[in-house]
Amino acid sequence: SAVISQKPSRDICQRGTSLTIQCQVDSQVTMMFWYRQQPGQSLTLIATANQGSEATYESGFVIDKFPISRPNLTFSTLTVSNMSPEDSSIYLCSVGTGSPTGELFFGEGSRLTVL
Amino acid sequence: AQSVAQPEDQVNVAEGNPLTVKCTYSVSGNPYLFWYVQYPNRGLQFLLKYITGDNLVKGSYGFEAEFNKSQTSFHLKKPSALVSDSALYFCAVRDHLTGGGNKLTFGTGTQLKVEL
């Protein structure tokens, strides 16, 4: 399984600011995803990070709010823009092989608190 | 569309007793089913998956899960619970027909509490 490192692990942010979360994988991976886990809730997929092209966003998520980069097969960033308290969540990077039978592997998550 | 339901927010069990965490699913085609565990302040860890074949699959830490197509269920089980099993458990599904875009759809999670 891949080793996935996320930075920062946690942060406290002020309303209106933006924060970029980094995800580094120790091997090349086909698929990278960003999930959000709001307090006491399940995981919701934000987007699929596509290498060399624009991310594919799920319904309810837009690029202006959650810009994503994926410059290569081992690295991706998620920015949470113009944050409000409602953005307080755990953001999880996830990777997969691209096989429909394959499991996903997750980073430790980035816990953001917006004041 | 693919979806997963975990009907219990919390399950309490005494150490040494068997445990069951319930999961039901809905997909258009055949399902690929997964269980994950999340310990406090940690990411998700993969436990086991059902793709095809034997309905009883075994995974990490002594957990197993039983796939039941007629009941569209994939319940997680362990014969003898440990206090260290206390965590948040997620069931997830991917639709065989569409591949779900390779993404997983997660249930709402079940908090397992194992007490002495």
Image (tube, helix red, strand yellow):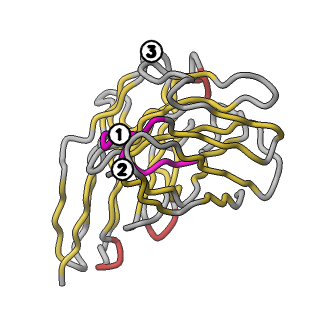
> Chain under label 3?
B
Q: CA distance from mark 3 to mark 2?
A: 39 Å
Q: Who's the residue at 28% across and 30% down the image?
A: B71
Count of number-bearing discs: 3
Contact between marks 2 and 1 (CB within 8 A): the answer is yes
**Which residue does the numbered mark 1 point to in the structure image?**
A84
Q: Residues within 10 Å of mark 1 (few under 14, many from 20)?
A: some
Q: Nearer the viewer, residue B73 or B83?
A: B83
In the picture, measured across the screen, residue A44 lies left or right of residue A109, that is left
Q: Nearer the viewer, mark 3 or mark 2?
A: 2
Q: CA distance from mark 3 to mark 1?
A: 37 Å
Q: Nearer the viewer, residue B16 or A21?
A: A21
**Which residue does the numbered mark 2 point to in the structure image?**
A114
Magenta-highlighted residues: A82-93
Query: Is residue B47 something one can see in this rendering?
Result: no
Asked if the stretch drawn in magenta spans residue A86, the answer is yes
Q: Amino acid at mark 2?
A: Val
Residue A17: where, in percent of width, then height? 47, 43
Number of the label disc, if any, that sits on residue B28: 3
Q: Who's the residue at 37% across and 26% down the image?
A: B3
Q: Who's the residue at 45% across and 35% down the image?
A: A82
Contact between marks 3 and 2 (CB within 8 A): the answer is no
Q: Nearer the viewer, mark 3 or mark 1?
A: 1
Residue B22: where, in percent of width, then height? 26, 46
Q: Amino acid at mark 1?
A: Ser
Q: Amino acid at mark 3?
A: Ser
